[in-house]
Amino acid sequence: KQVLIRLQRAGATSVAVQEDTFADLLSSGRLVPTSRPMNSDGEGQLFLCPDPALAKQIRRAVQNRFPKGAESKAGTTILGDSEGPILVPGRLSDLAKFGVGLDRDVCGLARRLGLEVVARLGNPPGATEAYVRDAIQDAQAAGASGVIFSADQTLGWRDLVKTGAGLLKESGMWYGTVEFVQQMGDSLYKEEMLPNVVRVHSVLPVEMDRMNPSEAVGRYTLAASERNVRACYLRAPSPISPDPVQTYAEFVYSLNRSLAKKGLSAKPAHPFQEVNAFPLARFGVLLGVSTFVAWFGMVLFARAIWILCVWFVVFVSAVMAGLYDDPRYLALLAALAFPTWAMLALFSASRKGGKNDWLFLYCLISGVSIVGGLHVAALLSDLPFMIQAKQFLGVKLAHFLPPLVVAVYLTAEQANLRELLSSAVRWGGFLLTIVVVGALGYMLIRTGNDAPSQVSGLELKLRSLLDRLLPVRPRTKEFLIGHPIMVLALTMLTRGDRRLLPLIGGVAAIGQVSMVNTFAHLHTPVSASALRVLLGLLIGLVLGWVVRAIYLRFFTSPQRALL
């Protein structure tokens, strides 16, 4: 009781209660094995349960979770209350992972103190529909407000996942989906449980052992402020400290202070609300995307008739195919068209004359990409995308194809492809091409949240530094690669230096497509994505100014050409 009081005063709002299993009861001494067999034949084993209330809970669980147990030969007998022996259809060694329900004393104490209860349920091998049903009903009866499944499986995996999700939704409890953790059946639970889904962030025990409390606080704060996490699952940072409870309470208090600095406060977790978008607003977004796709077609084919044709085909096809209800394909089309159109149209316009100010072009191209990102965000602004039950399609394609199109188009614009392919290879250009293609390939591997192991230790330190210095951390490939190279490309363009413009332009497109992709992460608030993009543009502009100065100083005279 005193532990819960101290944690509550520090700012804790809920307590996670792990369902007791037979293994837990044996290891804690709440079930005591005897040397006597359970019958005169010497078969089975007899156990004693000193707590009558626990014995009653075990009896209820056995009756409900093993409804056909009475028809089977008992393998275990438990004595503990006045209602007679409890016959368990199997040996406890075989049923070690089977749960018997939440500890009612712990749940009752937490609720009396004003803490909400979050049930932790496991998925034992061989769980039946009766087991799944009773596990959820028991958590509901214990007063749990939500459920977070333990280990790497959701309750009912694999054949009873939909059954479990349906029962959980009927109970009124929310489902906690833990980010960055691959729990089997999680995607099905998220789909079935909408809208009663809460995003959870957790740090594994092995990670907590390597992490100091301030690092853990920063990680939880980042998850809550930038990724729409609604529940922070906290583990004790140092169980071997002189006063573990005090250390734990200080950790909780520090996290609350850190959240407050971000304008957040600790409250019981609650699910997301449904997004009620104005129908005509989404229709307008659809119209905007179609128009930009038509403009993109005009740039590629340079014929006015293509404006009407492409616009008509895209718009009508989108409506007929039902993309108005499932906008992922149209969002992918927008992610491809906006940044590519911005670079090709403005690079070409600059070549033919017009305003040749590199800073103006930098802002204009980036502005078009941001508009494209906002279109993508508007199309995907729906609850399934906010909790990652659905995700933006074609992430790698949206990153790789626009730079490739830009490079090929600019090459074709300044040289005949047939003549270029038949001309002699210059080693400098060849090596630079290999480097650029390798960089694009590395970026493609790194793209997405499924390849965290590809991040180097140096980059992790840089990310940590930026997290501490800035309100949100801009993407590395934007401010360190794409935007500085964009400044270089525009400087070369406005000076009429087109020797390496296709390659430089292709690399510069990386920053533009990354900006659009940033807005496709709807589990991150759009305001945070916008701030991340703007900070990346500003830092990239400063670094680009340095690159521009180096180019003007060393590579602008004929004697100092790049190749």
Image (cartoon, helix red, strand yellow):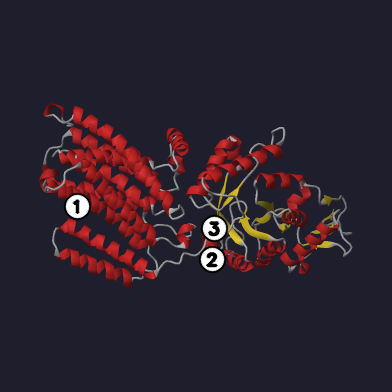
* Disc 1 versus disc 3: nearer the observer: 1
Dot 3 falls on a residue whose secondary structure is helix
Residue receiving disc 1: 345
Q: CA distance from mark 1 to mark 3?
A: 44 Å
Kindly identify the amino acid type of the residue bearing the numbered disc 2: Glu
Dot 1 falls on a residue whose secondary structure is helix
Residues 436 and 137: in front is: 137
Residue receiving disc 3: 186
Dot 2 falls on a residue whose secondary structure is helix
Whole-percent x and y of residue 92?
A: 76, 54
**x 34%, y 68%: residue:** 283
Residues 46 and 396: in front is: 396
Residue 430: quadrant of the picture: top left
Residue 98 is left or right of residue 348, and the answer is right
Mark number displayed over residue 552: none
Residue receiving disc 2: 192
Rendered view: 272 above or below 30: below
Q: CA distance from mark 2 to mark 3?
A: 10 Å
Residue 431 is left or right of residue 447, and the answer is left
Q: Residues within 10 Å of mark 3 (few under 14, many from 20)?
A: many
Whole-percent x and y of residue 415?
A: 11, 45
Quadrant of the rendering where the C terminus is positioned:
top left
Q: CA distance from mark 2 to mark 1?
A: 45 Å
The reply to whether callout 2 and callout 3 are in contact (CB within 8 Å) is no
Residue 42 is left or right of residue 240, and the answer is right
The reply to whether callout 1 and callout 3 are in contact (CB within 8 Å) is no
- Is residue 74 visible in this depiction of the protein? no
